[in-house]
């Protein structure tokens, strides 16, 4: 087999790097292996037949440009982990074949994951135009066309410490396809053994702020390049176009939450406010006693108990039932059936925010707690990465907009909520942000219970992939809508 690949991997420790180098060399496809090390690195891997590339970091722009400069083969491979890699038979040959056949700029594959001595298949998902998440999982082994790699590096006009690989992938996607091989071509070691529900807030961790700033900048520059960047110009919002009997409606979709729904309802009914409000509970055919708990509050005239005629509704469909109801107020304010408002001023603060910030949607903040309402990490989730000028562009990169969410009802009625039970809120937020400003409240408005019955607490890789694929599809649809609007075609 021709040795047509230059490979790059980061330094970790001599044993792990040595094992990876052995696996790469045994493939028969590698012409040269470079280990990316810090400028002051002194340790040498004995007898490995490798060279060292000194750079500030493996994900830095500086490192990638140096990689492009030393590459003289048809393909480039990067391995991004510090633990031993075990390539499958003919894995690199298969990646090269598919890269050649498809004309791809970059190919990646499914893999086996070794976690605490257990080996499991780890499928990944197809890349699409809206796959703008910086945490998109390509696996740790990626093969690039040398021409695509070099061209992308030549167009890097920002110097990133953390977002270099993200910037590289975005630039390649502007000119080439990114192809997913649905074959298990290698084994990598997975050290992050947290549950899915514990990982999803990493992007709002204040400790990662410097990383997120770079990622936002890279994504925003990409949107400019593909004519999907939106300037901070928004449609004017008027709140007196229609008459409503109530200023606000709190909306709770619920199915089988007998242990928590009473607390949620009580936290709404305890609100003290100058605004006239009601509570619309859409009871999606509960079978565990939830319906009876709701009925126990029926003596309060503010409680509207809706049982839909349809039995095929997800959370989004339940939201539509509430919003199209003639009993829905001018503003529809979200509360999940697991959670409860933090105090009796939430409705006032949310409605005031609409008028003060002149926006079509308001997103608050919340505090993470366990079932007994004791605070748990990461604590406050406030999404302070949002900015008035660039929030709606950065929204295409991050995995959510925050909570609780509240909407100007006429706008929400015009868009409607997708009839799904995951990502429906994100889809609506993106669609609203295309035209309208989204307001923010950075103080906590509710307590978010994390417990085993949360829908996203413990997800296997297949379910996680389904969720991520759907959110990427939402981004793709929104991205295409924005590009059409910027071209003067769409609305």
Image: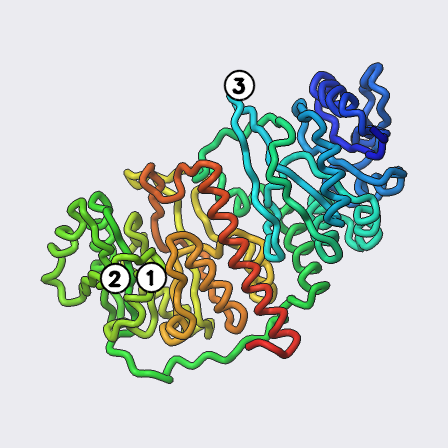
Question: Residue at image x 29%, y 48%?
Answer: 338
When the figure is inspected, residue 391 is found, relative to residue 159, above or below; the finding is: below
When the figure is inspected, residue 452 is found, relative to residue 484, above or below; the finding is: above
User: In what element is the residue under mark 1?
Assistant: helix
Depth check, front residue: 225 or 149: 149
User: In what element is the residue under mark 2?
Assistant: loop
- Measure the C-alpha gap from mark 2 to mark 3: 47 Å
Depth check, front residue: 437 or 3: 3
When the figure is inspected, residue 209 is found, relative to residue 114, above or below; the finding is: below
User: Which residue position is annotated with label 3?
Assistant: 117
Visual colour scheme: rainbow
User: Which residue position is annotated with label 1?
Assistant: 317
Marks 2 and 1 close (CB-CB < 8 Å): yes
- Measure the C-alpha gap from mark 2 to mark 1: 9 Å
Using the rendered image of the protein, determine whether residue 168 is visible from the camera's viewpoint.
Answer: no
User: Which residue position is annotated with label 2?
Assistant: 310
First in sequence: mark 1 or mark 3? Answer: 3
Depth check, front residue: 94 or 424: 94
């Amino acid at each position: 087999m021709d040795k047509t690949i230059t490979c790059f991997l980061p330094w970790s420790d001599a044993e792990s790097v040595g094992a990876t180098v052995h696996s790469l060399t045994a493939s028969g496809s590698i012409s040269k292996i470079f280990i990316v090390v810090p400028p002051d690195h002194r340790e040498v891997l004995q007898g490995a037949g490798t060279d060292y590339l000194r750079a500030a970091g493996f994900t830095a722009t500086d490192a990638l440009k140096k990689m492009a400069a030393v590459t003289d083969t048809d393909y480039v491979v990067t391995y991004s982990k510090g633990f031993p890699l075990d390539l499958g038979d003919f894995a690199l040959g298969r990646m090269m074949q598919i890269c050649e056949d498809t004309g791809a700029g970059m190919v990646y594959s499914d893999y086996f994951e070794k976690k605490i001595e257990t080996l499991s298949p780890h499928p990944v998902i197809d890349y699409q135009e809206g796959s703008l998440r910086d945490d998109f999982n390509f696996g740790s082994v990626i093969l690039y066309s040398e021409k695509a790699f070099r061209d992308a590096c030549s167009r890097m006009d920002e110097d990133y410490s953390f977002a270099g690989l993200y910037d590289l992938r975005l630039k390649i996607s502007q000119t080439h396809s990114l192809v997913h091989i649905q074959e298990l071509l290698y084994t990598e070691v997975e050290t992050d053994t947290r549950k899915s529900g514990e990982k999803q807030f990493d992007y709002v961790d204040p400790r990662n702020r410097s990383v997120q700033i770079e990622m936002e900048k890279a994504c925003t520059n990409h949107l400019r390049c593909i004519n999907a960047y939106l300037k901070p110009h928004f449609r004017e919002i008027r709140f007196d176009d229609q008459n409503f009997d109530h200023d606000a409606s709190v909306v709770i979709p619920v199915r089988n939450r007998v242990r928590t729904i009473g607390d949620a309802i009580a936290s709404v009914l305890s609100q003290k406010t100058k605004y006239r409000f009601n509570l619309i509970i859409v009871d999606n055919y509960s079978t565990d006693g939830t319906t009876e708990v709701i009925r126990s509050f029926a003596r309060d005239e503010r409680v509207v108990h809706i049982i839909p005629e349809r039995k095929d509704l997800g959370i989004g469909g339940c939201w539509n039932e509430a919003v199209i109801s003639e009993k829905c107020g001018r503003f529809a304010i979200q509360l999940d059936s697991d959670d409860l408002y933090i105090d009796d001023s939430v409705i006032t603060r949310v409605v005031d925010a609409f008028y003060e910030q002149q926006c079509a949607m308001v997103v608050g903040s919340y505090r993470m707690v366990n079932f007994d309402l004791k605070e748990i990490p990461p604590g406050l989730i406030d999404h302070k990465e949002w900015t008035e000028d660039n929030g709606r562009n950065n929204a295409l990169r991050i995995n959510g907009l925050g909570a609780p969410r509240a909407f100007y009802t006429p706008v929400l009625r015009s868009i409607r909520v997708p009839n799904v039970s995951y990502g429906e809120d994100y889809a609506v937020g993106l669609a609203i942000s295309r035209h309208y400003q989204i307001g923010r409240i950075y103080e906590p408005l509710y307590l978010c219970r994390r417990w085993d019955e949360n829908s996203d607490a413990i997800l296997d890789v297949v379910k996680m992939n389904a969720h991520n694929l759907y959110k990427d599809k939402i981004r793709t649809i929104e991205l295409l809508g924005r590009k059409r609007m910027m071209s003067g075609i769409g609305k």
